Amino acid sequence: MDFLTRVTRHLRDAQAEDPTPMVKGRDVVILGGGDTGNDCAGSCVRLGAKSVMQLEMMPRPPVARTEQNSWPQWPKTLKTDYGQEEAAGIWGADPRIYETTIKEVLTENGHITKVRTAAVRPSGKAGFGVEMVRKQPPAWRPARSWCIIFPLGTECGRMRVLLCTA
């Protein structure tokens, strides 16, 4: 399911499928960040999500440039965009959880009952794709009504709903 496309279609055409039931009253987990993850966070807030948690595998960026990231390089600093700001305005905290990913999802009768997250850290090895090393044992997060969204980013320009409970 293409989540952001559904949201936009419904905004432009009230007769189009309403994406609200996908997230309204649910605990939403967004796997990943960037612009697409931020758009998902903002959309989920506006569609009435019970909570929004945005998992980022990478460490939290510094607030200011470091010596290793001087001008004229692109600033690799913490950026908080409208989606995270809206979530923080409602729930009192930035929805991003850094150095964390989903390890496992448990279901019962087709419904997500638990999401197992794992704290991770970059291994420090160079190359395409960062090898992640487990930092702590995985932790279970019990769920009543989860929706897990995987933002594929600008390469595909889509955001897929990976799993939703009813």
Image (cartoon, helix red, strand yellow):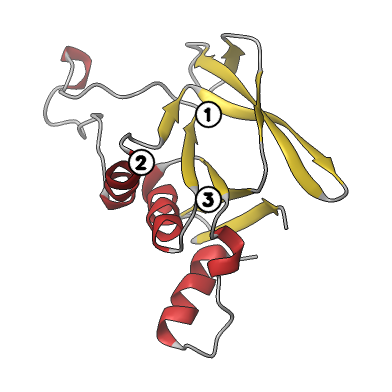
How far apart are the alpha carbons under marks 3 and 1? 19 Å
Task: Using the numbered discs, state the Cα–Cα distance from disc 3 to disc 2 in whole angstroms.
Answer: 22 Å
* Residue type for callout 1: Phe
Which label sits on residue 91? Answer: 2
Rendered view: 8 above or below 100 = below
Q: Residues within 10 Å of mark 3 (few under 14, many from 20)?
A: many
Q: Amino acid at mark 3?
A: Pro
Label 3, on which residue? 151
Mark 3 vs 1, N-terminal side: 1
Q: Which residue in the protein does label 1 denote?
A: 128
Q: Position of residue 143 (x, y in %)?
A: 66, 38
Q: Residue at x 25, y 29 (%)?
A: 76
How crowded pointer 2 is (Cα within 10 Å; few <14, some 14-19, many 20+) is rated as some
Q: Please tell me the numbered disc located at residue 101.
A: none
Vertical relation: 80 (above or below) 66? below
Q: Earlier in the sequence, mark 1 or mark 2?
A: 2
